[in-house]
Image (tube, grey):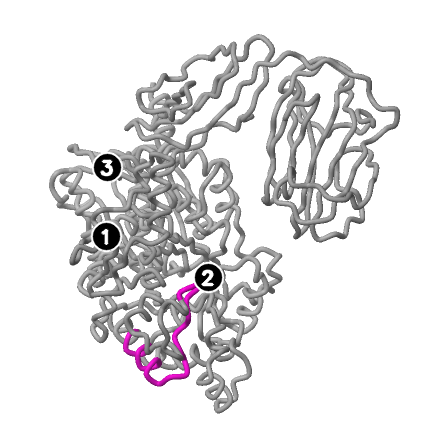
């Protein structure tokens, strides 16, 4: 009897540990539990009063009164060397968190929190139990960040605090606020009131209309322009908003209590259109906006004393406001053609012996860096700041995967670097079933960067960026960053491959996220072929873990919470398109997946070709789609099967493979066609796979019902330049996927 109780309790402990994200360095679940009641007090070292008060109010919300007495102890342990490390022990008698600093204590509290049942987040009750355990933990990287672009679309103080709350739960410690850009200035600067009176507001722009269009197309209210950020002035409707310095202080204070440092970015010298529209003297040569409002905007002019004065005044107010060590100067994508045309710039470069426009940006960075230094701050910038040379004290944010050498160059120069590459760590990228894993598996120390061990020590850590051109609401922001933020946290904190159990821990954590009102992206349906062929009837079924329901429609409409539930296999006897989606307990819908069912008769065989292989005609030229392939053939080749013939050295071309495919058995065949760029496969005159258009290597699949024997085979392929690939595999009746054997082809 007792033994069973022990096993049950240990199972409970294991379930609780199955919610920990990021997973701690060392976890030893024990038997038993500590029951927290209103009489469980928090006793803390004086250095940890803020953390003690955070914990008391957190528990007090659930218990209905702040706990008093003893039971939870937050103590100093100077032997824990990592300033963010901690030791958490839970026994039936006591909960103890020790650390050398307050950050470690805070992270110990976050781990304790994730060990408590999810109802702690929004429920109430007289007691709540923490499973016995012993956890020793510390992060691998000191910088675990999230960027929020509040310029392209604006977010309220309430939303920023919610963002900070999500970060704190996952032990992320830097919130980078992208406060200004071409589309809006979002922070009060007392020296320059027009920056917020005017530059914080715009009439609806192309980014707003893109969101409106997305709302219309998808019916998704997350794309709605938030009416809280719209005003009408003298009959003119404007979008915008800004943080007052008092609001910024409130955000900084809120974040500091959660051990999140807020790093401000004012993007200079490019991306400054919002400011220039009100202060045109910031340009080298003043001209009407219609002359320069194109592409990336004209940069401000580093060759004018008034501009340097402006930059110092702005950053001076920032340095006084933000306690962060780093201040971000942006520095990305500076469109230098206006500098190139300017006689003022030419004169200045000659006088100062500045050899290139990149070096002119470096001159500006050096000047500002010295100013930051005088304010006790360190300059940080996007990786372009490395190009014209940069002082080794500056810190760099690597974002351009195509400038892969820049982490090498920066770390070799002694600069600290935060890895935040476009692709895996740009969370504005539309998520699909692969994005979470690509975040998790991103390696900031990858050998592709070529850094020595010594250079790797300059990697501060990782950060994900949320650019908000198409993110007009907090709900859309939540959807894009969650659950990716947890994968980022595990990458930055643990940097170990635990992906399989990470997915289980994620699954166990959705209940908590629901209670915290996080508008996360729902999990994907299992992977499925998106076009299916059948002869008499087809069956369709997918299952998801217990908390999710799957709903579908067959009439082309988007499934809603009232659409039929998929609880047993559907029998399909005519051609139709099924739309399927996962639903959360509160009725929220996941991404909609389409599956086409095509009722076909078996294609009857024809007489095949006399020779083995396929004919392949090549066309020189740039084609956007395979249907555009044409003109005079460049050469006629034969190939043993499907693949790119060796020795094609054209920058852009099209290929037409023609012949027959001889299948050995009657059945339903699936074909999987991967190409970079576009391709289309037709068999027996039927379109089987449409993978057309310009795109990176991508697989598409389709099915066809074939009688045993030869059928016409036509595959078109185009490479628009930049290198190509082409591959065809098949499976029969959902069997294993294999390459299509060359012996099947004739022409
Ligand atoms: C950036 O994405 N332009 C830093």
Is residue 296 a member of the stretch shown in magenta?
Answer: yes
Q: Secondary structure at mark 3?
A: helix
Disc 3 vs disc 1: which is toward the camera? 1
10 Å neighbourhood of mark 2: few (<14), some, or many (≥20)?
A: many
Picture residue at 60% right of the left edge, 11% below the top: 535
Ligand 1 closer than 8 Å to label 1 CB: no
Q: Residue at x 38, y 73 (%)?
A: 378
Residue 416 percent coordinates (x, y) = 47, 68
Residue furthest out toward the left:
65
Locate the C terminus and report the quarter of the image it occupies: top right
Residue 120, label in figure: 3
Q: Quadrant of ligand 1?
A: bottom left
Expressed as whole percent of the image width and height from the top left, the position of residue 248 reads 23, 62
**Residue 228 horizontal side relative to residue 289, left or right:** left
Question: Pointer 2: what residue?
Answer: 418
Magenta part of the chain: 293-314
Based on the displayed image, in which of its 4 quarters is residue 547 positioned? top left
Determine which of the numbered discs, if any, sits on residue 689 in the image: none
Q: Is residue 168 magenta?
A: no
Question: Relative to 744, is 77 above or below?
Answer: below
* Percent position of residue 355, x then y: 55, 83
Residue to which mark 1 is pinned = 156
> Mark 1 vs mark 2: which is more N-terminal?
1
Name of the residue lying farthest toward the front: 631
Q: Residue at x 33, y 36 (%)?
A: 220
Residue mark closest to the camera, 3 vs 2: 2
| Residue projecting furthest to the bottom | 351
**C-alpha gap between disc 3 and disc 2:** 34 Å
């Amino acid at each position: 009897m007792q033994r069973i109780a022990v096993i049950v309790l240990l199972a409970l402990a294991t379930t609780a540990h199955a919610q920990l994200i990021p997973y701690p360095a060392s976890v030893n679940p024990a038997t038993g539990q500590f029951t927290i009641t209103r009489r469980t007090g928090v006793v803390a070292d004086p250095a940890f009063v803020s953390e003690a008060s955070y914990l008391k109010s957190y528990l007090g919300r659930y218990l209905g009164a702040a706990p008093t007495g003893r039971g939870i102890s937050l103590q100093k342990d100077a032997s824990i060397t990592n300033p963010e490390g901690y030791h958490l022990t839970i026994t039936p008698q006591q909960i103890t968190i020790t650390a050398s600093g307050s950050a470690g204590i805070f992270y110990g509290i976050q781990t304790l929190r994730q060990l408590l049942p999810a109802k702690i987040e929004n429920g109430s009750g007289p007691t709540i139990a923490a499973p016995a355990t012993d956890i020793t933990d510390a992060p691998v990287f000191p910088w675990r960040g999230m960027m929020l672009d509040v310029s392209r679309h604006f977010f309220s103080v309430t939303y920023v605090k919610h963002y900070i709350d999500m970060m704190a739960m996952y032990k992320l410690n830097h919130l980078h606020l992208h406060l200004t850009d071409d589309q809006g200035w979002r922070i009060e600067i007392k020296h320059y009131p027009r920056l917020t009176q005017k530059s914080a507001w715009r009439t609806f722009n192309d980014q707003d209309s893109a969101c409106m269009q997305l709302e219309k197309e998808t019916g998704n209210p997350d794309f709605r322009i938030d009416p809280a950020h719209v005003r009408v002035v003298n009959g003119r409707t404007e979008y915008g908003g800004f943080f007052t310095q008092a609001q910024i202080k409130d955000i900084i204070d809120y974040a500091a209590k959660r051990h999140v440092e807020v790093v401000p970015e004012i993007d200079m010298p490019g991306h400054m259109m919002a400011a220039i529209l009100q202060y045109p003297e910031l340009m080298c040569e003043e001209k009407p906006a219609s002359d320069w409002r194109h592409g990336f905007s004209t940069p401000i002019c580093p060759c004018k004393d008034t501009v340097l004065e402006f930059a110092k005044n702005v950053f001076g107010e920032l340095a006084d406001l933000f306690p962060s060590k780093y201040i971000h100067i942006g520095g990305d994508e500076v469109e230098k053609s206006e500098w190139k045309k300017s006689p003022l710039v030419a004169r200045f470069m000659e006088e100062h012996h500045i050899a290139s426009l990149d070096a002119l940006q470096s001159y500006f960075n050096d000047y500002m860096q010295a100013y930051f230094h005088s304010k006790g701050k360190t300059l940080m910038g996007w990786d372009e700041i490395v190009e014209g040379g940069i002082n080794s004290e500056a810190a760099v944010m690597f974002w351009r995967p195509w400038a892969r050498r820049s982490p090498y160059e920066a770390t070799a120069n002694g600069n600290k670097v935060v890895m935040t590459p476009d692709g895996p760590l740009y969370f504005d990228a539309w998520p699909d079933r692969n994005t979470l894993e690509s975040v998790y598996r991103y390696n900031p120390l990858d050998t592709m960067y070529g850094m020595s061990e010594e250079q790797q020590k300059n990697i501060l850590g990782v950060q994900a960026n949320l650019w908000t051109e198409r993110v007009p609401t907090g709900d859309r922001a939540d959807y894009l960053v969650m659950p990716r933020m947890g994968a980022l946290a595990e990458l930055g904190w643990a940097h170990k491959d635990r992906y399989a159990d990470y997915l289980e821990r994620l699954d166990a954590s959705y209940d908590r996220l629901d209670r915290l009102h996080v508008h996360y992206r729902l999990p994907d349906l299992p992977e499925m072929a998106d076009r299916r062929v059948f002869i008499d009837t087809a069956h369709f079924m997918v299952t998801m873990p217990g908390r999710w329901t799957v709903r579908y429609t067959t009439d082309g409409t988007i499934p809603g919470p009232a659409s039929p539930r998929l609880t047993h296999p559907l029998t399909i006897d005519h051609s139709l398109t099924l739309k399927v989606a996962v639903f959360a307990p509160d009725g929220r819908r996941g991404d909609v997946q389409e599956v086409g069912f095509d009722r076909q008769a078996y294609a009857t065989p024809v007489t095949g070709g006399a020779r083995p292989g396929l004919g392949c005609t090549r066309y020189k030229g740039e084609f956007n789609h395979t249907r555009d392939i044409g003109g005079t053939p460049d050469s006629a080749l034969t190939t043993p099967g499907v693949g790119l013939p060796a020795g094609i050295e054209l920058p852009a071309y099209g290929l037409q493979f023609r012949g027959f495919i001889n299948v050995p058995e009657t059945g339903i065949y699936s074909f999987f066609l991967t190409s970079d760029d576009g391709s289309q496969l037709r068999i027996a005159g039927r379109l089987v796979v449409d993978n057309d258009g310009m795109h990176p290597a991508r697989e598409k699949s389709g099915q066809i019902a074939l009688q045993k024997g030869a059928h016409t085979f036509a595959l078109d392929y185009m490479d628009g330049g930049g290198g190509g690939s082409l591959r065809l595999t098949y499976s029969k009746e959902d069997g294993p996927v294999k390459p299509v054997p060359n012996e099947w082809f004739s022409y």
